[in-house]
Amino acid sequence: MPASIRMKDVLDLTELEAKAELENIALEMAKADIAYYQNDDPYLTDAAYDALKLRNEQIEARFPHLVRADSPSKKIGAPLQSDFKKIALKVPMLSLADIFSVEELKEFVSSVRRFLNTDENIDFTSEPKMDGLSFNARYEHGKLVSASTRGDGKTGEDITENIKTIERLPHLVTAPDFPDMIELRGEVYMSKADFFALNELQISQNKKPFANPRNAAAGSLRQLDPNITKSRKLSLLVYTWGEVSNILWHSQAEFLQKVKEWGFPVNPYNKLCHSVDEIVQSFENLQQTRADLPYDIDGIVYKVNDLALQQRLGFLTRTPRWAIAHKFEAEKAVTKVLNIRVQVGRTGALTPVADLEPINVGGVMVSHATLHNEDEIKRKDIRIHDYVTIQRAGDVIPQVLGVVIEKRPADSKEFIFPTVCPECGAHAIREEDEAVRRCTGGLSCPAQAIERLKHFVSREAFNIEGLGAKIIEDFFKEKIISRPDDIFTLEERNGGDDLFSLVQGLHLEQREGWGEKSVQNLFKSIRDKRRISLPRFIYALGIRQVGIATALLIAKNYADFDLFANAMKAEDLSKLLSIDGIGEAMARDIIEFFKEPHNLQIISNLRKYVNIEPFVDTTDYHSKIAGKTLVFTGTLETLTRAEAKAKASAMGAKVAGSVSSQTDFVVVGKDAGSKAKKASELGIQTLTESEFLELVK
């Protein structure tokens, strides 16, 4: 899960927190989709993306009235690039729901049986989930006439000429039973061997290597010049169909066999399973042999085999009821620690990172892994030149699981964590109650200054497009941007045609990789951010321990930035400490921030350019349940559980997931279980659904 998304229990989220988090997730996933589908250069791991997707689903289930128009749950893929012609898909290319455990797999099979009202075994196909780029190829009278990517599920990019360069895709099919019109769908991929060969060529030509085979395949297929696609070895497999004039098969297995007879490649590991045990066995077998396959897969797709049953099961909003994707666990690998270096973050925290001998883990070349802090290094006894087991999980930077002791060199020495900052030489101290050692150099430390600037322009803060991490670093080193307020004077400092400007101006458009259009886009993005919400502004300041959720709580309780700032400067802790979720340590860090003259000067400078909008809270704090803690149990008749919780939150109540001595009311529906019993034992007042509705009128 990216650091920008806070993992507070969904049941404990207030409506405002949920709304803010849904916005953050939508922005993050939209950015990730563009990086993945359009730029073929993902910055999130599959696990991190899946975690965001699951989090979004959980919050939307609890707050259905907060579902956004741009919600990831309503989207497939990403908007198309304008460089490609568009092809409309008459039969949408939908996505699949994901599961991550055998227990969820068994529940999926049970849900299919329940829907069909049968206890009999149902046949499923088990098909490896290829990690490539989906395609739709249309044939008319046996001739390949067009092909497209999935795009946004309804409209794809025209890749007809490019896909024709893939050897195993027939351009003409003469089989007598081949339909007059059919769209065949599948995955274009690059084998591991071809991927490594391509990267060697890229490096030899001083070009950027691809991160993984999926990126290489997608980037190669989505070339405006088909000759480039032809020069790279791509493969494909067919697994389903779209629009078709005449369906000649009655099951998924029959279709795959028919496609194979027509001369199209299908995955040799496809299986027909007649029981849950066989499905589970197919998963375990593929997971064990996954690393030895010549191509990358990231899971297995299970489909109800019988087409008649598929039609009965139908679809949910954007996923079929009769199919699901079972994702694999994160892959592991063993490699060597070449060095341990210490990075300095925006709050002065010293974070150790292992530089590794590059190794392919789950299709990604890994050369770095986080070591978290000095206690973690000591606990695992990680040393330079050790061999370690690493894992790609939800983190963008993989983690070290442990040391392979039997491979440790005889002259190995324990790693000694530095007590001075590696960037500025200032003392690095560690408070008694903290696991982190911090540089005392403050903003005189260049590493902290750069990281704070990166935080300030980040998506959850001011969200200034065009000021990425590398540009911030370059601008800081060249003294173009030293403080946050310098960002808002960039446009006026950029050179014009007069003599003074020619000598003193920045002339950003003359920098390598820049142009007049990109500079103007940057200036527009900066101008657009001269008005900002109170929670975003507080978060952007980079106060230690103040994340998105805490910034929202502060905004909710102070409403106006001046009221908040004046209280902090006066060291008035009474209101701050009364906020549920803010403790003494956090309050101390907030007060310390406002004691620092440099921070106050930056805020004063920013106020010249930025309009901070007052916070408007729509919660009804005068309701009969405002400030009360409620728990819902059992089945409600007139409301869904999510609707009931939303009503309670909007009335200023806190909704908890379990009953405790702090609970004020337990709303009891039909078939209530242990929560109602515990409420009775603790003497907590219970409410019927009608009594609850009376309270929230």
Image: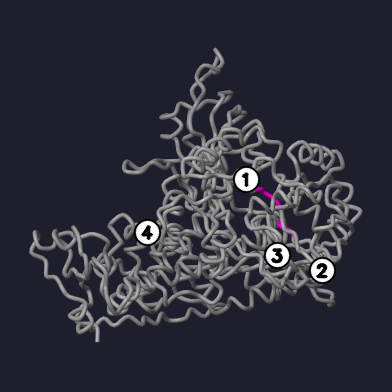
User: Magenta span has 209?
Assistant: no
SS at mark 3 in the image:
strand
The magenta stretch is 130-135
The amino acid sitting under disc 3 is Gly
- Foreground mark, 1 or 2, reads 1
Pointer 3 or 4: first along the chain: 4
Q: Is residue 555 visible?
A: yes
Residue beneath the point at 67% across and 35% down: 293
- The answer to which quarter of the image holds residue 140 is bottom right
| On screen, residue 364 above or below 600 | above
Image side of residue 379 versus residue 244, left or right: left
Which residue lies under the disc numbered 1? 128
Q: Is residue 132 magenta?
A: yes
Which residue corresponds to mark 3? 242
Q: Amino acid at mark 2?
A: Asp
Q: Which residue is mark 4?
A: 8
Q: Three-letter amino acid code at disc 1? A: Pro
Identify residue type, mark 4. Answer: Lys
Residue 383 horizontal/vertical position (percent):
52, 25
Which of the two discs, 4 and 1, sits closer to the camera? Answer: 1
Residue underneath mark 2: 83
| 2 or 4: tag closer to the N-terminus | 4
Q: Earlier in the sequence, mark 2 or mark 3?
A: 2
